[in-house]
């Protein structure tokens, strides 16, 4: 089946009638946004308009299920994954062996949640965006809090990706500043995100290949230097668990966005097949690149050109450019390709940002999806420029923090689906997705999420806060967030149902 079948019937109807003036009003277009000539032109060019409106079952016809593998593979096969691996030695003083073991085992664990929660079940079978599905646990108004937290997280990832891409792009020439490189990266990502589902899936299927070539060349010409890693101090449980929290935070927040890319899939797809497509799409790129990042940054002090490229500010792009420098101008070309590797991640993140804006402020659901791609870019671009010279502090604090709420969020959705809805997708009634009084109140979900932080906070061990438990054990906030939120949700949800059913 071609990608043409991924476009909804509504969009095809708009495209075929773009030159007419008899466009119908569709749900979410009560103000006639799509009757504007520019909007009609965009639809005729294949721009996806659909925002948070669920996809009816008869329109879920996409059978190219392998595409979800490439979405996650390309999103994570970039220099941000490489840079996350460098945090083991740089931020926590771990050696290569310990860094790689943490990267391996905690990614194998953490990647399972977004693969199952966001792709294996809800997306194809409900036809709903991730945050719309979450209304059936958090309620119409309660989901606003996770949507805002997710917006912060998605913008944070874009900021980090923008900084890395700009650094790498600027490193190939002395005439370009980091700021100019950042702007170029965002413009490319915005164009991809603006177009929507079809273009996004096409781009993610091809974007990984040049990046693979670049990393293979870097490994080929610089691999002999990776054995020059400086000896490290013996690892402690505190440093291992703190680095594990960062690794988990890197991937687990995908739980709040992943089904945004599967809502057009045929609902009869095998759950096992989609799960493994998604799971492998996470671990195949993330684990090798994070291990390579740890090895490269440990070897940098022993290689003068690497050390100079990396610099005092932690210029990951400069380090990669130095690794590729033995192949001359071809190395500079490959560095440019590596800088562009972050555009796939930024584009997908901008795509999901659209729906989080619409859920956080329900009135915005009447605005076409692509408008929020521009808004998300307008927010993250200047922040990337401002934070460009404080990359490592930003990366460490950000990745450690965002994993807490996402773990609790995932636990709540799983308990709701398997216990209170008996794994029955027919209970996600399409007719009530935007009817507040017919959805759950959300008090149980919000309450269990907030109460779980009563134990999460003492278990934190961050640069900006050390809890009494985290000081001795390392950061175990991520590990306690999931089971604690699940346990708390059971009685609170039963209580909520009892009182909601009596009204």
Image: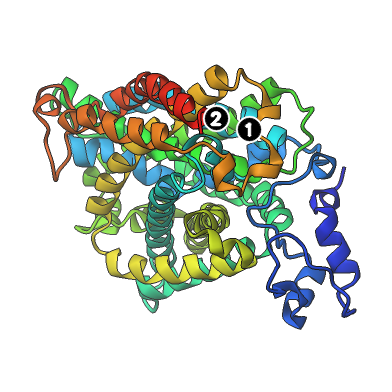
Left or right of 288 on screen, residue 1: right
Per the model, the C-alpha gap separating discs 2 and 1 is: 7 Å
Disc 1 element: helix
Q: Please, is residue 56 above or below residue 467 in the view?
A: below
Label 2 close to label 1 by CB (< 8 Å): yes
Name the residue located 15 percent from the left edge and 28 percent from the top edge.
Answer: 470
Disc 2 element: helix
Q: Quadrant of residue 125?
A: top right
The residue labelled by disc 1 is 122
Q: Please, is residue 129 above or below residue 332 in the view?
A: above
- Front residue of 440/156: it is 440
Residue 279 is labelled as none
- Front residue of 56/312: it is 56
Left or right of 465 on screen, residue 495: right
- Front residue of 331/262: it is 262
Name the residue located 45 percent from the left edge and 38 percent from the top edge.
Answer: 442
Name the residue located 38 percent from the left edge and 49 percent from the top edge.
Answer: 149
Residue 117 is labelled as 2
Left or right of 138 on screen, residue 69: right
> Residue 276 placed where, x, y %?
63, 25
- The quarter in which the N terminus is drawn is top right
> Residue 152 placed where, x, y %?
38, 54
> Residue 451 placed where, x, y %?
27, 31
């Amino acid at each position: 089946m071609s990608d043409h079948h991924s476009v909804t019937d509504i969009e095809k109807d708009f495209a075929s009638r773009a030159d007419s003036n008899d466009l119908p009003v569709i749900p979410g277009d009560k103000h006639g946004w799509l009757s504007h000539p520019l909007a009609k032109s965009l639809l005729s060019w294949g721009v996806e308009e659909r925002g948070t409106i669920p996809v009816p079952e008869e329109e879920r016809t996409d059978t190219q299920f392998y595409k979800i593998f490439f979405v996650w593979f390309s999103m994570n096969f970039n220099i941000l994954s490489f840079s996350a691996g460098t945090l083991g030695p740089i931020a926590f003083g771990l050696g290569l062996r310990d860094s790689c073991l943490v990267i391996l085992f905690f990614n194998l664990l953490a990647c399972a949640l977004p693969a199952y929660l966001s792709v294996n079940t809800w997306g194809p079978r409900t036809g709903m965006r991730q945050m719309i599905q979450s209304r059936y646990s958090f309620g119409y108004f309660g989901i606003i809090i996770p949507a805002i937290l997710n917006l912060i997280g998605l913008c944070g990832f874009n900021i980090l990706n923008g900084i890395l891409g700009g650094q790498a792009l600027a490193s190939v020439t002395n005439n370009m500043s980091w700021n100019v490189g950042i702007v170029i990266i965002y413009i490319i990502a915005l164009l991809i995100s603006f177009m929507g589902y079809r273009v996004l899936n096409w781009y993610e299927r091809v974007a990984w290949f040049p990046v693979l070539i670049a990393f293979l060349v870097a490994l080929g010409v610089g691999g002999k230097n990776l054995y020059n890693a400086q000896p490290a101090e013996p690892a402690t449980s505190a440093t291992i668990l703190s680095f594990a929290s960062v690794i988990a935070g890197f991937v687990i927040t995908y739980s709040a966005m992943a089904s945004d890319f599967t809502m057009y899939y045929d609902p009869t797809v095998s759950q096992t097949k989609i799960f493994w497509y998604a799971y492998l799409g996470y671990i195949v790129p993330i684990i090798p690149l994070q291990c390579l990042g740890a090895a490269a940054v440990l070897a940098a002090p022993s290689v003068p050109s690497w050390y100079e490229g990396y610099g005092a500010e932690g210029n990951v792009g400069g380090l990669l450019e130095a690794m590729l420098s033995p192949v001359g101008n071809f190395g500079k070309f490959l560095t440019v390709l590596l800088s562009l590797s972050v555009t796939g991640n930024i584009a997908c993140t901008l795509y999901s940002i659209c729906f989080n804006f619409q859920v956080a402020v329900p009135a915005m659901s009447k605005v076409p999806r692509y408008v929020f791609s521009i808004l998300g870019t307008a927010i993250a671009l200047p922040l990337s420029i401002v934070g460009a010279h404080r990359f490592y502090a930003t990366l460490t604090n950000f990745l450690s923090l965002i994993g807490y709420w996402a773990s609790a969020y995932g636990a709540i959705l799983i308990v709701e689906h398997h216990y209170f809805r008996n794994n029955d997708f027919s209970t996600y009634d399409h007719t009530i997705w935007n009817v507040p009084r017919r959805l759950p109140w959300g008090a149980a979900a919000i309450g269990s999420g907030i109460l779980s932080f009563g134990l999460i906070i003492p278990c934190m061990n961050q640069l900006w806060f050390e809890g009494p438990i985290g000081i001795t054990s390392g950061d175990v906030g991520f590990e306690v967030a999931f089971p604690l939120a699940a346990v708390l949700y059971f009685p609170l949800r039963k209580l909520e149902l009892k009182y909601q059913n009596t009204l």
